[in-house]
Image (cartoon, rainbow, N blue to C red):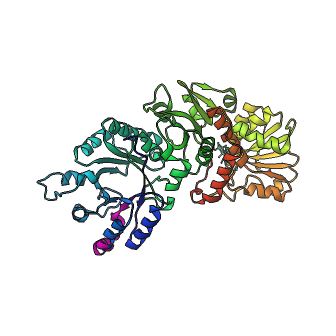
């Protein structure tokens, strides 16, 4: 089974036959395997246009999976009788049928009043749970395997990336038992199962044609799965890297790292993991001594809110990360997990490129969180005279004592005479904070350069105020790219192709507006 090419199945859910016809035509350009959710069609269309529907399937060169979901699924209005009537009419050639487990069990009993002469060799028997991951997935597998259906399918709702583990384990079991299986964890925390599933023996992975037309939560579009993640090139030898954070859907890191892997011709993939319980995730899925999954996992990027918490789960932490007090990069090194901080280097390089030697430069850092710590560490290391400006005196005191810098209140601060003013807060980030700035033009007048760590949008309210005040400006994209390039080098032992990550980030920023409705960034 592993030798068959990875299949991408485009899911279609349309309410009219005319719309379905258009969707089939567009989707056939991308894949020759299409899932049609017939329960999405308006009931009148389904009843009155059945010959037109049949013709659609007969005329297309694509292979179809026809589904008609149960009342337990996300569409509540399809009862047993309707489903039975549907399947008794559904004799389309060139199709697989996706039949819910509860109905399949009824259909399979010959004395049952709704028993049907269904072609089990063309049947996928499926189990969906839209509320979570049932405790005994193995028992559900047993029930699926007990029907005469050829292919087994489980789709459960993930709440944490660790929910991918039982799903991957089901694929392992099916592989060991020689069964064809589709196993998916729905929701953003489950995307790893959609990207890696086929490489672990999954019969197919589903994708909508466009993210907006997703038929299940957390689906990546067909083009993202193919072009960004190159899911069809992944095999058991592929080195797996990823990002852990909460949330992560907005992140540019998968676009940058996967582009760099592709450009380097490396058999590697970078996967987003939306993680709640970071210790459980590292223990059960990542740490070589305790993980319960056999995979070629090599490293992780770490973003908010886990940069501090991960430190407790690591075997060794480099001195820079210890001094900054945060880890944003994990390397799986033989039997150990090693922690690094590449934010500090990512922060300072663009600044040195803009201003040269920073020894003695007067630098103000606004904010008292993780990026402010990385900035202060780097500025101190470069010999600059740094000060922290924050709205929370307790946090500012803690951080100023740690780095031995002056601490000031942000309110009414004046930055006249500073060489650099850094915005290390989320103020100005696309979304509800987009019009916020931590300092006004009035406050910035007389400063030399304003450096905003926020990179989306590229011109923030803070940078606009700085321009009005006559300061030079520097956006956060260079830092984002810089820290990612450092990560790549730590993991791969070589630099990524020049400009590859920057180009990928710019491309995503200019085209990916639909995902930019969340507050935070990398
Ligand atoms: P944290 O949550 O750790 O810290 C944010 C800090 O900003 C807190 O001290 C918070 O104060 C303060 N803050 C928030 N809003 C305001 C405001 N309106 N005015 C004044 N202070 C405010 O976040 P990070 O330090 O990890 O990240 C901060 C931002 O830096 C991110 O949103 C991201 O945009 C950017 N970043 C960019 C990177 C890059 O590569 N370009 C890398 C890392 C971060 P309080 O505690 O009082 O709420």
Q: Which residues are magenta?
A: 34-51
Q: Is residue 45 highlighted in magenta? A: yes
Query: Residue 145: horizontal and vertical position, in percent?
Result: 26, 43
Query: Residue 424: horizontal and vertical position, in percent?
Result: 71, 45
Please name the residue shown 44% across and 41% down the image. Answer: 199
Q: How many marks?
A: 0
Please name the residue shown 72% across and 40% down the image. Answer: 346
Q: Which one is nearer the viewer's eye here, 424 or 7?
A: 7
87 in relation to 3, above or below: below
Image quadrant of residue 358? top right
Tell me if residue 315 can be seen.
yes
Q: Which one is nearer the viewer's eye here, 489 or 227?
A: 227
Query: Residue 64: horizontal and vertical position, in percent?
Result: 35, 59
Image quadrant of residue 15? bottom left
**Overall secondary structure of the magenta stretch?**
helix
Q: Is residue 442 highlighted in magenta? A: no
490 in relation to 259, above or below: above
Q: Which one is nearer the viewer's eye here, 437 or 190?
A: 190
237 in relation to 98, above or below: above
Query: Residue 188: horizontal and vertical position, in percent?
Result: 48, 49
Q: Judge from the rendering whether residue 420 lies leftward or rightward of residue 185; answer left or right.
A: right
Q: Judge from the rendering whether residue 83 lies leftward or rightward of residue 61; answer left or right.
A: left
Tell me if residue 136 can be seen.
no
């Amino acid at each position: 089974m592993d030798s068959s090419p990875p299949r991408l199945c485009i899911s279609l859910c349309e309410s009219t036959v005319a719309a379905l016809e258009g969707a089939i035509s567009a989707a056939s350009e991308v894949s020759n395997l299409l899932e049609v959710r017939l329960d999405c069609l308006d009931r009148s269309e389904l009843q009155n246009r059945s010959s037109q529907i049949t013709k659609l399937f007969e005329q297309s060169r694509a292979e179809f999976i026809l589904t008609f979901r149960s009342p337990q699924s996300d569409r509540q209005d399809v009862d047993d009788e309707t489903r039975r009537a549907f399947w008794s009419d559904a004799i389309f050639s060139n199709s697989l049928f996706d039949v819910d487990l509860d109905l399949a069990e009824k259909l399979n009993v010959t004395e049952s009043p709704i028993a049907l002469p269904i072609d089990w060799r063309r049947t996928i028997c499926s189990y969906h749970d839209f509320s979570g991951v049932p405790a005994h997935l193995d028992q559900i597998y047993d029930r699926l395997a007990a029907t005469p259906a050829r292919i087994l399918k489980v789709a459960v709702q993930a709440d944490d990336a660790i929910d991918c583990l039982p799903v991957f384990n089901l694929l392992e079991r099916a592989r060991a038992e020689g069964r064809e299986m589709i196993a998916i964890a729905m929701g953003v925390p489950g995307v790893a199962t959609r990207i890696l599933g086929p490489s672990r023996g999954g019969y197919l992975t589903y994708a909508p044609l466009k993210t907006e037309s997703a038929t299940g939560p957390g689906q990546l579009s067909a083009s993202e799965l193919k072009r960004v993640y190159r899911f069809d090139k992944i095999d058991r030898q592929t080195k797996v890297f990823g990002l852990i954070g909460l949330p992560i859907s907005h992140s540019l890191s998968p676009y940058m790292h996967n582009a760099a892997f592709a450009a380097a011709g490396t058999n590697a993939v970078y996967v987003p993991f939306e993680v709640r319980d970071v210790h459980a995730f590292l223990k059960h899925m990542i740490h070589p001594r305790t993980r319960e999954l056999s995979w070629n996992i090599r490293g992780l990027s770490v973003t908010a809110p886990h940069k501090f918490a991960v430190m407790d789960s690591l075997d060794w932490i480099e001195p820079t990360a210890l001094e900054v007090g945060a880890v944003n990069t994990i390397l799986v090194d033989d039997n150990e997990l090693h922690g690094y901080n590449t934010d500090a280097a990512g922060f300072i390089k663009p600044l040195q490129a803009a201003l040269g030697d920073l020894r003695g430069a007067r630098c103000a850092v606004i904010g008292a969180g993780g990026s402010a710590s990385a900035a202060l560490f780097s500025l101190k290391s470069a010999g600059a005279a740094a000060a922290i400006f924050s709205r929370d005196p307790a946090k500012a005191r803690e951080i100023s004592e740690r780095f031995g810098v002056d601490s000031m209140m942000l309110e009414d601060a004046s930055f006249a005479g500073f060489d650099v003013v850094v915005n290390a807060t989320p103020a100005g980030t696309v979304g509800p904070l987009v019009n916020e700035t931590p300092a006004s033009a009035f406050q910035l007048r007389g400063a030399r350069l304003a450096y905003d760590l926020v990179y989306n949008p590229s011109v923030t309210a803070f940078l606009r105020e700085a321009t009005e005040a006559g300061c030079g400006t520097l956006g956060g994209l260079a830092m984002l790219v810089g820290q990612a390039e450092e990560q790549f080098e730590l993991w791969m032992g070589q630099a990524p192709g020049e400009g590859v990550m920057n180009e990928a980030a710019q491309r995503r920023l200019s085209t990916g507006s639909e995902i930019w409705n969340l507050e935070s960034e990398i």
